[in-house]
Image: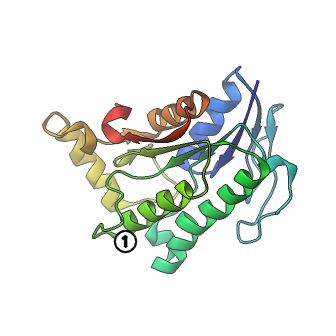
Amino acid sequence: MTSILILGATGLVGQQLLTLALDDTRISQVIAPSRRALAAHPKLSNPIVDFEHLPLDASWWRADVVLCALGTTMRLAGSQAAFYRVDHDYVLDAARLAHQAGSSVFVLNSSTGAKLDASSFYLRVKAETERDLAALKFSSLILVRPSLLDGGPRRQQRLGESIAIVLCKLLGPLLTKRLRPISTAKLAKAMLCAGLSAKPGIHVIESEQLH
């Protein structure tokens, strides 16, 4: 039986990961550290944490697979520095602790177009996070790079993103698979499957492979 550690379990993708993992009979335990309490479940361990001050020696850092959907938006973060703190530093801090505890498989929700020399600050941060995770030397590191995410209504409305999703759906047949929106359900399923079937080394799953 397998233990799963989910980072970012309260977000759109993280919620999907949590539901899938709790329902999967191959998984015996799900650990989901979060800032606020999650609904109780017999398989769920839900440590309440402050990502600015993560516990260094908690036994729950060790899991067979770590699934990371931790992240924010520039609008919610309020600045580039705050965005970087969440999407890079929080991810790396948690990954480092999980790796030190013996977790060997790490799956990251990144982004299509992630490049160190990208013109977009967002994509550069994603690329730096990928690079720095690789330096930790997990036995298996899977980088999943979805396009625009379609996960239904959000608590925080994003007008620009909503318009982009509608346009992409209308233009769907004319767009390459890499540019088509990805449902959060499909992304979560792909992340979980990749983690459970992980092979040694670094592997990249591009957006077109998620359709």
Q: Report x, y in % for residue 172.
A: 20, 37
Q: Is residue 206 left or right of residue 144?
A: left
Q: Quadrant of the N terminus?
A: top right
Image-based side of 57 in relation to 186, left or right: right
Residue 80 visible (yes or no): yes
Residue at 45% across, 71% down: 75
State the residue at coordinates (25%, 45%).
Answer: 179
Q: Is residue 116 left or right of residue 43?
A: left
Query: Closer to the camera, 158 or 79?
Result: 79
Q: Position of residue 76 (x, y in %)?
A: 51, 70
Residue labelled with disc 1: 121
Farthest residue toward the top? Answer: 25
For residue 170, which quarter of the picture?
Answer: top left
In depth, the one of 57 and 38 nearer the eye is: 57
Count of marks overlaid on the render: 1
Q: In this orientation, which residue lies closer to the viewer: 153 or 178?
A: 178
In the displayed structure, would residue 24 be above or below residue 79?
A: above
61 with respect to 76 (left or right)? right
Residue in view at x 73 percent, y 46 percent: 32
Position of residue 187 measured from the top left corner of the image (x, y, whole percent): 46, 38
Residue at (53%, 64%) from the top-left corner?
A: 87
Q: Amino acid at mark 1?
A: Phe
Q: Residues within 10 Å of mark 1 (few under 14, many from 20)?
A: some
Is the image coloured rainbow, by chain, by secondary structure, or in one colour? rainbow
Element under disc 1: helix
